[in-house]
Image (cartoon, rainbow, N blue to C red):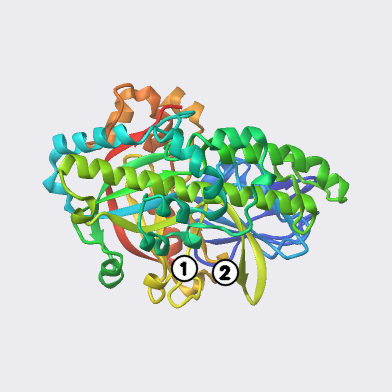
Amino acid sequence: MALLLGVRTVELIREGLNRYRLPRRGKMRVDAVVYVNEFLKPLLREDKSLEQLAHAAMLPGVVNPVVGMPDIHEGFGLPIGGVMAMEQDGVISAGAVGMDINCGVRLLRTDLRAWDLGTDRLRDLMAAVEEYVPTGVGRKSKRRDLSRRLFEQVVHAGVRSAVEAGLGRDTDLQYIEEGGCLEGADLHAVSREAYERGAVQLGTLGGGNHFIEFQEVAEVLDAAVGARMGLFAGQLVVMIHTGSRGFGHQICTDYSKSLLPVARKYGIDLPSKGLACAPIDSPEGRRYFQAMACAVNYAFTNRQIISHDIGLAFGALFKTDPEKLGLRVVYDVAHNIAKWERHHGRRLLVHRKGATRALPPGHEGNPEPYRDTGHPALIPGSMGTASYVLVATPAAAETYFSVNHGAGRILSRSAAVRTITREQFEHSMGSVIYNTRNFKEIVDEAPQAYKDIDQVVDTLTAIGLTRKVARLRPLGVIKGKD
């Protein structure tokens, strides 16, 4: 496979099972490494994801290598499924974090067995959740007054603000990446438009690929680690996928524009507009980090409030305290983020865009409950297909302790709407319940629009970077309208 970079053609070089290197050429300062198997490799021809990895490898301060995950596909700037680490004298890029800052996934466990619900009871549960959690693009919080009152606390202190307001327990903080708060946030770095969008959307799901999915633990593949996470076969669990809503989107929009002239000011030769950036230690770079951290903390808290409201829906339907149902957080991970971490003995700013942090057993960055197992890496499949819970191994050091964040698109939203028929959609969904009668509202998220989640997950497990803990089967999914 060849990639055209200016006048040079670069070949992907195989470096063992499921690893390919895009060697440094032209203006590239470092190599790129892509993790795909033989099933996924041909899909790299379908978009510009390799070109975008090469562009990231041209930025000043970038660390060798830039990494592409098995779910890699074209994005804006850095490809989705891309990981880029920067030295302290390098740059920070809004496009390498993404539009939906801290889009991420949270998994809730229960003591309920999935087969005890039945289809009608599951429909009732989904309806109850929708009564509490607004879904869809532009939807505003049902806790409007609380959202405005908490907003300025949330962006600086994260999930602890919600817990102190009665929306969760202190112990929840142990089960969230970064403890639910990325340090360094400053609301003064956020535009008035972003402020107004954020102040009214806490506790909302959004549209697009965001979802609340009710799942059955189909298999526990590592009994000891699964038990530590509170997972058992046949169990009902709930997966939440959402981010910083209009708040994070506006911050990325603002800084993607404002950082373009900043790059020129500092003499940075940008390979693409999507990688608009500034030196990390410049006033402009610091301001972007401060704004991004606000959105990171907002997103963690958004998922916390949604979790609390899901608990209220369980309590209302089952007429009991949700804690008596064993409802609690398994873990919460970020997908789109830049943060300081130590890798290979150095302090680096790691940009993950559509990628999940995964720390191995014994790593000091693990929260206490998962110190000796490694924290869960939550990997959602497409709507209608399996999801996975994984843990990393020490070998994942080569990816800056990063794994894929999902299945990865193979069809754009417009192509999915244009080509997937009702019959194809319904066949792919099988017995999975969804919350709309009009399939056109969610067909852009159909399984056919995504890569095979089993192939994506197996790519890293086959080479010993991850271990499977549990496989989750979808039962019903709540999606919001775009």
Circles 2 and 1, Cβ within 8 Å, touching? The answer is: yes
Identify the mark nearer the N-term, 2 or 1: 2
Q: Amino acid at mark 1?
A: Leu
Q: Is residue 274 left or right of residue 74?
A: right
Residue shown at 57% from the left, 69% from the top: 398
Residue shown at 30% from the left, 43% from the top: 310
Mark sitting on residue 465: 1
Q: Position of residue 2 (x, y in %)?
A: 66, 49
Answer above or below: position of 60 versus 3: below
Q: Is residue 88 left or right of residue 433?
A: right
- Density class for disc 1 (Cα within 10 Å; few <14, some 14-19, many ≥20) is many
Q: Position of residue 331 (x, y in %)?
A: 38, 59
- Density class for disc 2 (Cα within 10 Å; few <14, some 14-19, many ≥20) is some
Q: Amino acid at mark 2?
A: Glu
Q: Position of residue 295 (x, y in %)?
A: 57, 46
Residue 50 in sight from this viewpoint: no
Residue 156 in sight from this viewpoint: yes
Mark 2 lies on residue? 398
Residue shown at 79% from the left, 45% from the top: 6
Q: Secondary structure at mark 1?
A: loop
Q: Position of residue 216 (x, y in %)?
A: 23, 50
